[in-house]
């Protein structure tokens, strides 16, 4: 059942720019006028431009593509398994997700934020997450898999993210092993999977799957250290991308794959989208840099590399530098 805030937003959206009184909203929803005022205040904090006029009421005067649970859910089947919580700003959606998971949050809990002040990527990197320019979300999961199979979550999320981008924008999306999503020559999304392990069984107690998608260009551009490769969907495409629809598309695609675990029926698609195969790469291992050629992908999504002496090795995880994908 939708909460008061979501119901107020629905009423205002259905009013098509007309004012609706707080009293009428309260009567329609069976709550107090103070509850309506609190809901409006919360919606404003999330970026909704709601006008209040004495003796006339409230009016949603501008749709700034603000993220909301109601709008995301409107693009999902009624029987969807998600409990969505939208925040205007968090330190990190993954940090919030891990805290909630440790406190017993149900599988399918989704934290969505307009901004992250401490967004995180893999291998200790930060993820630039300025307000109202991206889609930043994390899902609490409780899969029955071993800790060493957590890479399956990352790789299926990469496929789901690529599919979602294509379904919403009609723009091809490629994958740079293991977790980066590219459109043309720009990185537009990244994935971070974290979790907690039962030390006796070796199984995951929970996992938190985080996704960050650069939807539009930041007002001041991307930081210099990532500006050569980072890009946004709207910057690549030249038209607006609806973030609520994109969020729903990702959740649908991911859940369809997740419910098939431990099957890896998305392997061939991941391999096809993985544009580093056949390319020369630089493998980063601590302070070391190894030149190699990416030649294959194992069924466990390990990257098979060939070193200059023609010996081969399978990387279960790691970071690589690779040429940008060819334009499509």
Image (cartoon, rainbow, N blue to C red):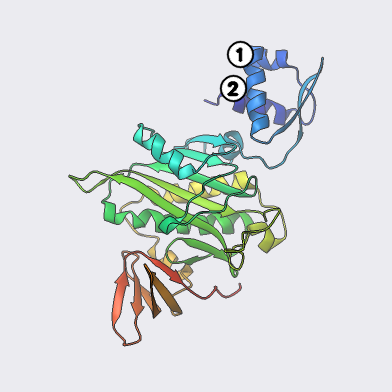
Where disc 1 sits, the SS reads loop
Can residue 206 be seen at all in this image of the molecule? Answer: yes
Query: Which mark sits nearer the N-terminus, 1 or 2?
Result: 2
Quadrant including the C terminus: bottom right
Image coords of residue 310 (percent x, y): 31, 86
User: Which circle marks residue 82 in the picture?
Assistant: none
Residue at the spot x=54%, y=54% of the render? 164
As drawn, 27 above or below 257: above
Left or right: residue 290 versus residue 46 is left
Can residue 173 be seen at all in this image of the molecule? Answer: no
Where disc 2 sits, the SS reads helix
Residue at the spot x=46%, y=74% of the render? 276
User: Which circle marks residue 31 in the picture?
Assistant: 1
The reply to whether dot 1 and dot 2 touch (C-beta < 8 Å) is yes
Residue at the extreme bottom: 309
As drawn, 210 above or below 306: above
Which residue has dot 2 on it?
4
Residue at the spot x=71%, y=53% of the render? 219
- Mark 2 crowd level (few <14, some 14–19, many ≥20, 10 Å Cα): some
Q: Give residue 44's quadrant in the image.
A: top right
Image coords of residue 245 (percent x, y): 60, 46
As drawn, 278 above or below 8: below
Residue at the extreme front: 287
Image coords of residue 226 (percent x, y): 57, 63
Residue at the extreme left: 200
Image coords of residue 91 (percent x, y): 51, 42
- Mark 1 crowd level (few <14, some 14–19, many ≥20, 10 Å Cα): few
């Amino acid at each position: 059942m939708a909460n008061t805030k979501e119901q107020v937003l629905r009423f205002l959206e259905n009013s098509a720019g007309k004012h609706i009184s707080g009293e009428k909203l309260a009567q329609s929803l069976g709550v107090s006028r103070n509850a309506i005022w609190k809901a409006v205040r919360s919606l404003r904090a999330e970026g909704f431009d709601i006008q209040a006029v004495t003796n006339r009421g409230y009016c949603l005067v501008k749709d700034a593509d603000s993220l909301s649970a109601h709008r995301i859910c409107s693009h999902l089947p009624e029987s969807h398994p998600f409990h969505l919580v939208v925040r205007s700003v968090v330190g990190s959606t993954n940090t919030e997700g891990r805290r909630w998971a440790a406190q017993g949050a149900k599988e399918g809990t989704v934290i969505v934020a307009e901004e992250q002040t401490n967004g995180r990527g893999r291998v200790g990197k930060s993820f630039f997450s300025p307000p109202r320019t991206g889609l930043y979300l994390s899902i609490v999961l409780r899969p029955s898999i071993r800790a060493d199979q957590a890479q399956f979550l990352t790789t299926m999320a990469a496929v789901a993210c690529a599919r979602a981008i294509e379904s919403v924008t009609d723009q091809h999306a490629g994958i740079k092993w293991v977790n980066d999503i590219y459109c043309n020559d720009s990185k537009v999304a990244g994935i971070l999977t974290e979790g907690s392990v039962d030390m006796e069984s070796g199984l995951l107690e929970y996992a938190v799957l985080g996704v960050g998608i650069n939807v539009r260009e930041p007002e001041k551009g991307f930081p210099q250290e990532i500006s050569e490769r980072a890009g946004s969907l709207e910057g690549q495409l030249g038209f607006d991308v609806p973030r609520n629809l994109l969020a729903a598309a990702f959740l649908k695609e991911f859940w369809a794959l997740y419910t098939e675990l431990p099957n890896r029926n998305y392997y061939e698609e991941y391999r096809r989208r993985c544009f580093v195969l056949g390319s020369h790469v630089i493998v980063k291992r601590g302070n070391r840099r190894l030149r190699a050629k990416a030649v294959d992908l194992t069924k466990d999504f390990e990257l098979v590399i060939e070193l200059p002496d023609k010996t081969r090795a399978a990387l279960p995880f790691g970071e690589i530098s690779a040429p940008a994908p060819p334009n499509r």
